[in-house]
Image (tube, helix red, strand yellow):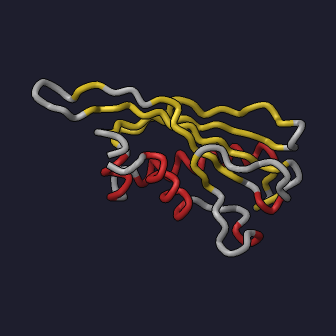
Amino acid sequence: MAEPTRVLINHLQTNLTDYNSSNRTGGARWVFDNLPQIQDLKKNYYPRIGMEILAEPGELAGAGSDDMISPVTIRMNIYVYKDLVLSSMQGQVLANQIGRDILSELRQNWRTDSTLKTNLFNYRVIGNRQLAFDEIRGLFRRQVDIQVLNINPGE
């Protein structure tokens, strides 16, 4: 099994619409594991998505098995710079749209994409919420939380 966040990052980096791709240089990444750098960046570095594992409990798969089944909870933090206007969207509207895009991408591909299908069993959305505006950094934020089943995570 591959690391669930790495599978998700690779899939979203490749397949999710980057509304700011024309302003990024050299195919720069915009989906990161853990929390991406958000301080002292110019607006063309946004939007950014950071991904982290919140919980990874596990239990034995059954009698006579050493396999662990883990419901892994993954949080995706979306950051959009306050003055960034892309595809006629800005601010919280853009952050909300990216959250919907993530969920749509998963819903449409989790059964057919072999990497997602093999590594992210039975995903479910457990949170999709708007967060307060970050006054200090000038960022609109959204969080999307999903849970996936993983067998022997990290192996």
What residue is rendered at 83% in x and 36% in y? Answer: 134
Between 137 and 19, the one nearer to me in the picture: 137
**Label total for image:** 0
What residue is rendered at 48% in x and 47% in y? Answer: 5
x and y, in percent, of residue 135 in the image: 89, 36
What residue is rendered at 69% in x and 38% in y? Answer: 142
The image quarter containing residue 68 is top left
The image quarter containing residue 136 is top right
x and y, in percent, of residue 137 in the image: 86, 43
Task: Give left or right: position of 120 versus 139.
Answer: left
x and y, in percent, of residue 6 in the image: 47, 52
In the rendered image, the vertical position of residue 110 relative to residue 122, given as above or below: below
Q: Residue furthest bottom?
A: 26
Task: Give left or right: position of 122 versus 84.
Answer: left
x and y, in percent, of residue 143 in the image: 64, 37
In the rendered image, the vertical position of residue 25 relative to residue 10, given as above or below: below
Q: Residue furthest left?
A: 64
In the rendered image, the vertical position of residue 67 relative to residue 16, given as above or below: above
What residue is rendered at 63% in x and 46% in y? Answer: 50
